[in-house]
Amino acid sequence: MTKINHLIALFVFLAGFIMVACDDPRVFDPPAKTNWAPSGARVVGNYNYDVIPQPDGFHTMHVGPNNSDNVWIAAAPMFELDWVAETSMYVPEGPTYDNEGNLYFSPLYPREDVSLVSLDAETGLRRWAITGDGRNGGSGAVLILNDPDNPGKQIIYHASYEQVMALNTDGTSIWSTASGLTLPTIVPGKKSDAHSFGFNYHPPTDSLIGVTIDGKLLAFDRADGQSIAPIEQLPGAPALSQLPALAQLIIDASDALTDSVFGQTPDGLSFFSLIREIIFGGGFLVTNYFGIDPNSGHIYVAGTADDDADGTTDGVSELGALYVLDLVDDGNGGLEFSVVNSTTFIGGTGSTPTISEDGNRVYVSDNLGNVITLDSDLNELWRFDVGDPIVASVAVSPDNSEIYVVTQFDVFKLIDQGNSASLAWSATLNAFDGFVSVVTQFNALTPTITANGISVSVGGGLNIGGSNIIFHVGMGLLDRDTGQLRYFAEGREESIAISSIAPDGGLYIANSPVRRVTGQVLFSGLTPAPIIGGISRYKPIRLDLLGRDAVCAAQARAANAASLGAPDAASADEDIRQIQVLIDQSRAALSNAVNDGDIDSATASSITAALDLAEPNLSLAGLSQAAADLATGCNLF
């Protein structure tokens, strides 16, 4: 480095410390009640919850098989960073939870040879781990299903590239079998396409479906792990990489930084460059999770079109594609995958397909900024341009025709109006007001729909050449009516995974730094060190407010359902399920709030009494009375 470069580096370093010293972080007051409420009948699916868990937390990558990113519970209205565990592991997918509150995730190419790790969700201590194969390329989010033979118990389903397994929640094996795939030979310096996106559940065949980054589909019997169909290869060619420009000097320094923290892949590649390639196409056929419609069993995979579909035979595809597959009779008494429909679109996609609860609509996004909505036959219904490339899956609510979309800059609420969409709001992401060191504030992760808001991540930093550099990052809760931040807490590390809500309303984030790596390289004085991996817990605080939001959400839902009458019995039945979940959540939160001193026992008892009165009336005939009792509880706050 020349003398002038030394002086520039020293200037940036000192300026950073001066700016940080001048930071005056915004203080968020306890949030008031939200006015958001469901209106009209909800969209309802025709399936039950004997195997598929109720959506009271993330039991798979995007909550359930259809990837709605919608949970029935209330997110903690106030929260704070509690702990970070397993900091040496890069975690780009997950985590997920069982109904006992345990946490599961699969790290990407860890230095420790493990394929699956379970943590105690309250303490972050490791419960157990499953040994890897020496080359674990990550195994997607862990799928958790109910055990229909043992009500109340759940089973953990895990798929690496070469091995698939079912486990009890204590880590003991139920079954384990070879996937039928073989890891490719290591070629130093060449990225491997041996990555599994994990399992999803296929109700019509009671089977587990897996998809890999190189476009292979697999199917296994849920009960015994036996393969039920030959491995299928999706059409498509490697995606055209659309990496934003970044100086090689910065790339090299960023690679060196992730090498020092996480090591390299078995192929000798660095995490920073590898993850950037995957995010922006990277020459793969499939770069995200897939969806299954529990109603029809249709399997939706977003990938790439064939090489020549874009008009040029050049070894890469410039078109995105959405494939619909079914498991069908092979004519010999067995099953096989069949591509029953497909469509292509300009721009490619890295999004997970989202299927509406009733299976009538499918939502994907392209790399040009469009939300694309299709019917179940893949006829396009509408597309809406949000102005910038969409960087995560579309979150779809069963209520009020609400859709939530994120770019690298903002969060948008759209309203699906049937044959078109309208913009309801763009979020106000002012989490880092008062930080002199933060020039730009922006969205940093997927949106998750909850009963009392939209869980998001907000980054603060600088935009250079169209790329966001993160200095600070944290989690926030947006009001569904306004897009304003109800609350925000700064965290320790960024994620490229999901805004994961646990059954207790807390947040657990899979640490997978990319933008903070560049921030550390370019602006070490502004970016808190060190770069870390693992899982971060944002624990609920002020549990009286969590109890409040849960009971008030239950009241709003009961009142709406009661107003709809008998013709909407299916909608009311689903509402009753969700109201019960919210009542249970409110009870648990209030009990802990008394122990924490957040609410006096007399007030908590009065609210609990209102819940007790409402519960026996959770029927179509009793919803009006249940709504009145829940209103009594909500108004006591």
Image (cartoon, rainbow, N blue to C red):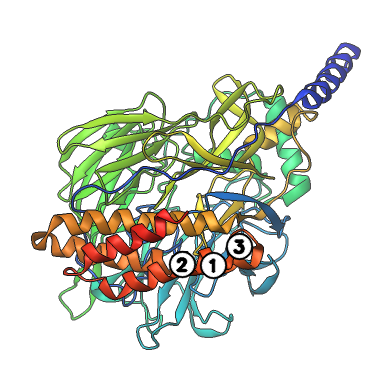
What amino acid is labelled 2 in the image?
A: Ser
User: Residue 14: where, in percent of width, then height?
Assistant: 86, 21
* Disc 2 crowd, CA 10 A, few/some/many (<14, 14-19, 20+): some
- Determine whether label 2 and label 1 are within 8 Å by CB: yes
* Sequence-first tag of 1 and 3: 3
Residue at the front extreme of this rendering: 602
Find disc 3 in the rendering and name its residue: 136
Find disc 2 in the rendering and name its residue: 606
Q: Residue at x 88, y 18 (%)?
A: 6
Relative height, residue 533 to residue 368 (above, below): below
User: Residue 216: where, in percent of width, then height?
Assistant: 38, 59
What amino acid is labelled 1 in the image?
A: Ala
Relative height, residue 223 to residue 299 (above, below): below
Q: Residue at x 36, y 40 (%)?
A: 404
Find disc 1 in the rendering and name its residue: 602
- Splitting the image into 4 quarters, where does residue 402 fall? top left
What amino acid is labelled 3 in the image?
A: Asn
Marks 2 and 1, Cα distance to the nearest angstrom?
6 Å
Q: Is residue 53 left or right of residue 543?
A: left
Between 615 and 207, the one lying in front of the other is 615
Q: Residue at x 42, y 39 (%)?
A: 239
- Splitting the image into 4 quarters, where does residue 12 fall? top right
User: Residue 344: where, in percent of width, then height?
Assistant: 25, 39
- Determine whether label 1 and label 3 are within 8 Å by CB: no
Marks 1 and 3, Cα distance to the nearest angstrom?
53 Å
Q: Residue at x 72, y 51 (%)?
A: 262
- Mark 3 vs mark 2: in front: 2
Decide if residue 430 is in sight here.
Answer: yes
